[in-house]
Image: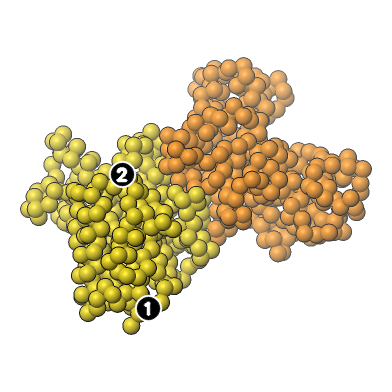
Chain colours: A yellow, B orange
Amino acid sequence: MVARGGIDLGGTKIQAVVVDGRFKVVGQARIPTPTQGKPRDVRDAIATALGEAVGAAGLTVGDLVGLGVGSPGEIDAAAGTVSQARNLPGWAGTYPLGPELAKLTDSPVRLGNDVQVATDAEFQLGSAKRYDSLLGVFWGTGVGGGIVLDGKPWVGRGAGGEIGHVVVHDGGRKCPCGRRGCVEAYAGRAAMEARARHLHEQGRKTKLFKIMKKRERTRLTSGIWARAAKAEDKLTLELLEEAVQAIGTGVASACNVLDPEAVVIGGGLGVRFGEPYRERIEQAMLPHLFTSAHPPKVHVASLGDLGGAVGAALLVRDVT
Amino acid sequence: MVARGGIDLGGTKIQAVVVDGRFKVVGQARIPTPTQGKPRDVRDAIATALGEAVGAAGLTVGDLVGLGVGSPGEIDAAAGTVSQARNLPGWAGTYPLGPELAKLTDSPVRLGNDVQVATDAEFQLGSAKRYDSLLGVFWGTGVGGGIVLDGKPWVGRGAGGEIGHVVVHDGGRKCPCGRRGCVEAYAGRAAMEARARHLHEQGRKTKLFKIMKKRERTRLTSGIWARAAKAEDKLTLELLEEAVQAIGTGVASACNVLDPEAVVIGGGLGVRFGEPYRERIEQAMLPHLFTSAHPPKVHVASLGDLGGAVGAALLVRDVT
């Protein structure tokens, strides 16, 4: 079996997979991303996750023909460096993640943008494999996006696909990015959490923080949002409705520009909330969609939580 | 001299040009688009405009090696038909404009989308000729857009580039398209005129309608807006500021998705207001731009009013 490794390096979790020659997942592991320390500590955590995934597949790291890593921050694919990954600890500078991991694997390591590799995974192997053009929307801590046009990734000058920073309310709510009125200001998990804390402090009742404490968390994870929604917590339902509206409006705006065949909704919240929310987002798009008579198809990311890591493994698809 | 004809078929004016082998304009004519009648009457008006332009170049229609037409509505380039051109008289159905014009010219006639050919003209010959990717923004009666990526037009499934229907205020002002909060609802000349009439009827003072009467017009043309702005008419300045903000926000959103090298501002108002408004639009983009540290270049369309017609002539560039 030709085995490849893939790492999805997120601000919250490191997801590692081992895939076979047809990119089927044969082993996987997930560990929390270090919240303190240096890039070196993150690199060690990646090594741990990879080791667990390889072990689960009944292999060793030496069996991998290559390793791909989907990373946040600015990526220099040729140099194998990651710079300014601000949601990773101590990573304001530049760290040679590729070479440092290659010491471990003894096989080629390639880096790619986390969102772009997840989009590519859905395009090559997932919900969008029957289409030629695609807008990938990753609804999680932030709201990221990736684009495939005519079968090829489109990243513009390197910063394309920022669907989370499409403006839906000019002069609207403050976004974690510092700007105002972006999709992410209403729909990003981090922004939703900040909004919930603010409203709770102002006296709004909510089960969100009770559930958080009960589950011994310090952040409102996707799972906590899902539990609170299931319990019909009013504040939760309101904030989710705002998120759906913002995503629907922003994605419709992007579709009015790109007119893609399909939209795939992934990310922690996108995958967690799944089909019912996909349908709500599709409905929220319609009033703004220039092509409302023949809208793009909207799908949930079929690779789910593993899409980012599988897409990372695709970075080394030509290594054998 | 190899001469080609180009027609920009607009809801207000028909612009005809004759270009030489290097696409330099050697003759041009402009006549009002018929506001009543049938597609046949529009076809006859195109023939008149073309005749005048050819005459001005010291040529006859028989001297043209080909004719290109940039048209609104739905275009079937292969069949040479235009359907549902709703800003042209009696054109809710399908009319074989290409074959009907070919009878006249005795040389190939090709049709293209009006905004896309204008974008292509700026890309091939105008302000954007040094770039590989471009967002064209045509600020006129409506707000249209065209996209070039990696040197090639991108139209999605056929309806891409609708920058005028990017949403800037979810639930905001009603747009002529029937939706709410689109760029065009604030920035399209038609929407601005409707807004001005409404506020004037409600008692707001403005010089706009006095200038319109004095100049014996029934619509607030680009020239009237420019005169009122020059006279520092307060309502005019307010509405133009709203327009600039909407264009800035919408274009920034589109740039956050596409990340193009350049933006070109054309169209009746874009060309009329020129450099000072280009700069204002550029400033209005900045607060929303993900790449504010290295923004795309913003230019005024250098082919001005003739860009659409010259771009139409480019449709027959390979005919000799």
Between residues A145 and A55, which one lies in front from this camera angle?
A55
Secondary element under disc 2, as helix, strand or loop, is: loop
Position above or below: A193 against A292 = above
**Badge 2: how crowded within 10 Å, few (<14), some, or many (20+)?**
some
**Residue at position x 32%, y 51% from top?**
A95
User: Can you see residue B167?
Assistant: no
Q: Which residue is mark 2?
A: A92
Numbered mark located on residue A22 in the image: 1
- Tell me the amino acid under the disc marked 1: Arg
User: Can you see residue B26?
Assistant: yes
From the viewer's perspective, is B246 left or right of B318? left
**Residue at position x 80%, y 59% from top?**
B319
Q: Chain of mark 1?
A: A
Dot 1 and dot 2 residues touching (CB under 8 Å)? no
Secondary element under disc 1, as helix, strand or loop, is: loop
Position above or below: B13 against A119 = above
Q: Position of residue B102 (x, y in %)?
A: 82, 58
Between residues A304 and A21, which one lies in front from this camera angle?
A21
Position above or below: B179 against B100 = above
From the viewer's perspective, is A12 left or right of B17? left
- Tell me the amino acid under the disc marked 2: Ala
**Residue at position x 16%, y 34% from top?**
A202
Between residues A156 and A223, which one lies in front from this camera angle?
A156
